[in-house]
Image: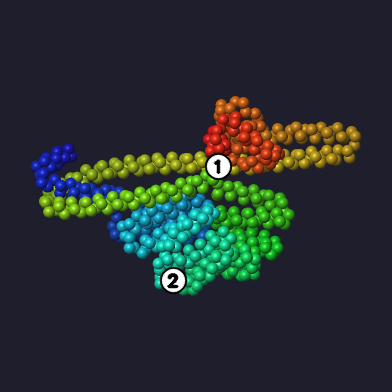
């Protein structure tokens, strides 16, 4: 191999006039070799079989998206494993959109948005190369709608409207009826924008949008979209107090969704029918449909549907004076809500959106550089073809292909190793983070349990004190001792249990706190522990039986002891970093 390289070098010096031709061909063939090394070589028939299998698996994932999210995710990940990592075409776009839909339905909005933005980035890049492609333009509009839907699921309605309006601007040039696909997209947007109007309580505007949509949908055959429009019209009539009309449209939507077996949509209709029943004081019917919606939401694993059902059931139980069931349902609702809509998730989602915008600008810049580079290479190609020698060209190219393949193979292996290590690190971090979040939620639930336990003991003590005079004289001393034992032991036992659970979850927190400020009292340490769990002032007030004002003053003193200067430093964030 070394002697061949020396021979090639000698040829370079002797053939100065042909050197430019040689360089061009070596680059060209080297790139070709790299492509063949990166992707296995398949015959035309094998490619068709692989593509057909990929599409079949992806279709299965789409089929289960509204029926069983676990099965949908299983098939989507299976399809992703079949897809080459460097592939950026319509197959990749379809897969990313499918994954985005699945994660959005499970409440993992951060991952959902990442896949939606990745799909849009690929589409935007392809549009720069094919600016007249109507298919790519249609995909771009669909991406904007998907992103808007994700923000809508997060209840960020202003942001969702921003993306809906951006999508709508791209189809306003076509009149309704000119293009069936555009009409279908226009219907989706009218439906989604009306849903935002509902959230802002602009029900008249929402109904106008739906009425415009019903005019267009006469030429369409989209059961899913038609049922969504009927369902949302029912919501508008419900909010306007027209309960009979609301019930009429809810049942029309339910009938269509049962025919197409859209379990997610069926659960939504159950929730709305129940809300309409509550407004008419038919609490038994409302409870029946809320429980149906909750069971169906749990069956398909749709967290947003479960959340809505739990919230409504908690309110219904409270109104019907079933306080214990209302309390348990509200606790389950609060835990699920905190897992879906916490501040950290919102911040990460904002970062994803900012990263997408930056990547979009970077892609435009890279595409411009590629365009100029292509123009330069075309000019060189014309010059080199004229001055080249075909025989010399082929001989040297074969040698360089052989050398290039070895280098590319090594580079590829090294890159795969780095990517694997990076993925493993991310998975470990994600696993640790999820474990900590679960333990925090478990600890918070335990605090609420301990509080109820303390309230129970206190209630027993008070009842014994009231009943003490009614006991015989010889038994009153025993009753007094029992009351004293309950009072002295309950608080210490509760705080001891809390300290044990907290120390088990947050190892070394008190030690780091003591190093930072050794003069903290036991009550101040307890306050630090509650704040480390991200409990609000009102929650701490309830747990410690102190007033909200007392807790506020205690927090202010704690900031001074910890030497936290300026309002821009958040006390909870400060303690979470210890």
Q: Nearer the viewer, residue 437 or 131?
A: 131
Q: Position of residue 565 (x, y in %)?
A: 55, 33
Residue lying furthest front in this view? Answer: 566
For residue 306, which quarter of the picture? bottom right
For residue 264, which quarter of the picture? bottom right
Choose the circle earlier in sequence order: 1 or 2.
Answer: 2
Image point 56% across, 43% down: which residue?
Answer: 438
Nearest-to-viewer mark from 1 and 2: 2
Q: Secondary structure at mark 1?
A: helix
Q: Is residue 295 left or right of residue 368?
A: right
Q: Position of residue 326 (x, y in %)?
A: 68, 52
Q: Secondary structure at mark 2?
A: loop
Residue lying furthest left in this view? Answer: 14
Q: Nearer the viewer, residue 41 or 237?
A: 237
> Circle 2 sits on which residue?
176
In the displayed structure, 75 sits above or below 255; it is above
Q: Nearer the viewer, residue 466 or 542?
A: 542
In the displayed structure, 419 sits above or below 224; it is above
Q: Position of residue 383 (x, y in %)?
A: 15, 52
For residue 135, say whether it is visible: yes
Q: CA distance from mark 1 to mark 2?
A: 49 Å
Q: Is residue 123 left or right of residue 406?
A: right
Q: Which mark is residue 437?
A: 1
Image point 65% across, 51% down: which residue?
Answer: 329
């Amino acid at each position: 191999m070394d002697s061949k390289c020396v021979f090639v070098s000698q040829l370079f010096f002797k053939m100065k006039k042909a050197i430019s031709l040689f360089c061009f061909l070596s680059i060209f063939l080297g790139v070709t070799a790299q492509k063949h090394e990166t992707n296995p070589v398949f015959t035309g028939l094998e490619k068709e079989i692989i593509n057909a299998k990929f599409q079949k698996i992806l279709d299965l994932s789409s089929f289960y998206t509204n029926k069983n999210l676990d099965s949908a995710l299983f098939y989507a990940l299976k399809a992703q494993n079949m897809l080459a990592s460097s592939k950026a075409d319509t197959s990749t776009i379809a897969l990313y959109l499918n994954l985005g839909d699945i994660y959005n339905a499970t409440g993992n909005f951060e991952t959902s948005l990442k896949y939606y933005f990745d799909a849009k980035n690929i589409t935007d890049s392809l549009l720069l190369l094919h600016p007249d492609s109507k298919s790519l333009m249609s995909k771009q509009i669909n991406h904007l709608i998907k992103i808007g839907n994700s923000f809508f699921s997060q209840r960020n309605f202003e942001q969702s409207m921003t993306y809906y309006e951006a999508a709508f601007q791209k189809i306003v040039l076509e009149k309704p009826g000119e293009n069936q696909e555009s009409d279908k997209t226009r219907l989706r947007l009218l439906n989604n924008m009306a849903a935002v109007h509902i959230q802002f309580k602009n029900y008249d505007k929402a109904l106008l949008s739906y009425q415009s949509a019903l005019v267009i949908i006469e030429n369409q055959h989209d059961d899913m979209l038609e049922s969504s429009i009927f369902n949302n019209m029912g919501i508008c009539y419900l909010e306007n107090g027209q309960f009979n009309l609301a019930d009429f449209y809810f049942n029309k939507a339910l009938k269509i969704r049962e025919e197409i077996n859209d379990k997610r949509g069926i659960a939504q209709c159950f929730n709305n029918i129940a809300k309409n029943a509550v407004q008419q004081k038919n609490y038994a019917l409302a409870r029946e449909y809320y429980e149906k919606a909750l069971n169906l939401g749990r069956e398909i694993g749709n967290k947003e549907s479960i959340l809505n059902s739990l919230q409504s059931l908690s309110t219904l139980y409270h109104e019907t004076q079933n306080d214990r069931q209302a309390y348990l349902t509200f606790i389950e609702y609060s835990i699920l809500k905190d897992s879906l809509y916490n501040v950290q998730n919102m911040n990460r989602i904002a970062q994803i959106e900012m990263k997408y915008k930056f990547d979009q600008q970077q892609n435009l810049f890279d595409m411009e550089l590629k365009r100029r580079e292509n123009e330069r290479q075309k000019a060189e190609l014309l010059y080199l073809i004229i001055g080249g020698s075909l025989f010399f060209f082929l001989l040297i190219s074969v040698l360089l292909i052989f050398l290039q393949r070895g280098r590319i193979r090594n580079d590829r292996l090294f890159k795969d190793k780095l990517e694997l290590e990076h993925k493993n690190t991310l998975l470990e971090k994600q696993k640790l983070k999820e474990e900590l979040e679960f333990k925090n939620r478990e600890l918070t639930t335990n605090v609420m349990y301990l509080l109820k336990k303390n309230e129970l003991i206190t209630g027993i003590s008070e009842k014994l004190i009231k009943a003490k005079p009614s006991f015989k004289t010889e038994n009153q001393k025993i009753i007094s001792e029992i009351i004293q034992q309950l009072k002295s032991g309950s608080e210490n036992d509760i705080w001891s249990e809390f300290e044990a659970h907290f120390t088990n979850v947050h190892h070394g927190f008190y030690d780091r706190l003591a190093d930072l400020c050794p003069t903290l009292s036991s009550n101040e340490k307890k306050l630090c522990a509650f704040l480390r769990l991200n409990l609000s002032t009102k929650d701490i007030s309830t747990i410690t039986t102190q007033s909200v004002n007392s807790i506020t003053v205690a927090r202010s003193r704690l900031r001074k002891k910890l030497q936290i200067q300026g309002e821009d430093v958040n006390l909870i964030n400060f303690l979470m970093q210890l």
